[in-house]
Image (cartoon, helix red, strand yellow):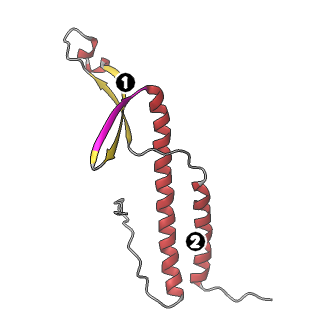
């Protein structure tokens, strides 16, 4: 039985569904995650006879993990071994956020095409395009 010719909106919806499934599969690749950021610090002890008086020879590296808790920034000094673990978990979180942002964007486009196909205007939220995050 011949298939009816698909509209541009239907073809685009099929393409968006495939893109969405691909993005969804990428979620399975994400490991443990951690909020916050990791900073490598070098410090001076302010002893004029210490090697750290030369900025190129400061003490360190010291690793600082920082995150928001109750609206305040919390920081902890952690070991180099812990820093390796948290670096990967923070990278995982950023990957997760990027995939979720992509899925939201694909969904928005799908909604635009689905409503247009049905002859209705799109009433969903506008996604920020300049890197701003939504409040949700």
Q: Out of 24 and 76, give the one closest to the viewer.
A: 76
Location of the N terminus by quadrant is: bottom right
15 left or right, relative to 93: right
Return the x and y of residue 134 as percentages of the image width and height: 35, 63
Q: Is 77 included in the stretch rendered in magenta?
A: yes
40 left or right, relative to 114: left
| Residue annotated with mark 1 | 61
Is disc 1 placed on a helix, strand or loop?
strand
Residue 38 in which image quadrant: top left
- The image shows residue 88, relative to residue 56, as above or below, that is below
Residue 130 in which image quadrant: bottom left
Is disc 2 placed on a helix, strand or loop?
helix
Q: Residue at x 37, y 24 (%)?
A: 61
Location of the C terminus by quadrant is: bottom left
Q: Residue at x 32, y 19 (%)?
A: 59
**What number is the disc on residue 136?**
none
- The image shows residue 91, relative to residue 113, as above or below, that is above
Near mark 2 (Cα within 10 A), the count class, few <14, some 14-19 or many ≥20, is: many
Q: Out of 66 and 133, give the one closest to the viewer.
A: 66
SS assignment for the magenta stretch, majority: strand
Return the x and y of residue 123 as percentages of the image width and height: 41, 82
Rounded to the nearest angstrom, the CA distance separating label 1 from label 2 is 46 Å
Residue 128 in which image quadrant: bottom left
Return the x and y of residue 19 as percentages of the image width and height: 59, 66
Q: Residue at x 59, y 61 (%)?
A: 24
Q: Which residues are magenta?
A: 73-79
| Residue annotated with mark 2 | 16
Q: Residue at x 28, y 43 (%)?
A: 73
- The image shows residue 97, relative to residue 36, as above or below, that is below
Q: Is 74 included in the stretch rendered in magenta?
A: yes
């Amino acid at each position: 039985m011949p298939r009816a010719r698909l509209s541009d909106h239907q073809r685009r919806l099929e393409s968006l569904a495939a893109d969405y499934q691909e993005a969804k599969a990428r979620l399975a690749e994400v490991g443990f995650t951690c909020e916050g950021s990791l900073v490598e610090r070098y410090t001076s002890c302010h002893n004029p006879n210490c090697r750290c008086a030369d900025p190129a020879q400061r003490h360190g590296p010291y690793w600082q993990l920082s995150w928001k808790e109750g609206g305040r920034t919390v920081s902890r000094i952690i070991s180099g071994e812990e820093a390796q673990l948290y670096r990967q978990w923070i990278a995982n979180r950023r990957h997760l956020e990027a995939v979720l942002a992509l899925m939201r964007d694909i969904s928005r486009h799908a909604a635009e095409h689905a409503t247009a196909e049905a002859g209705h205007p799109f009433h969903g939220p506008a996604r920020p395009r300049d890197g701003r995050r939504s409040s949700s």
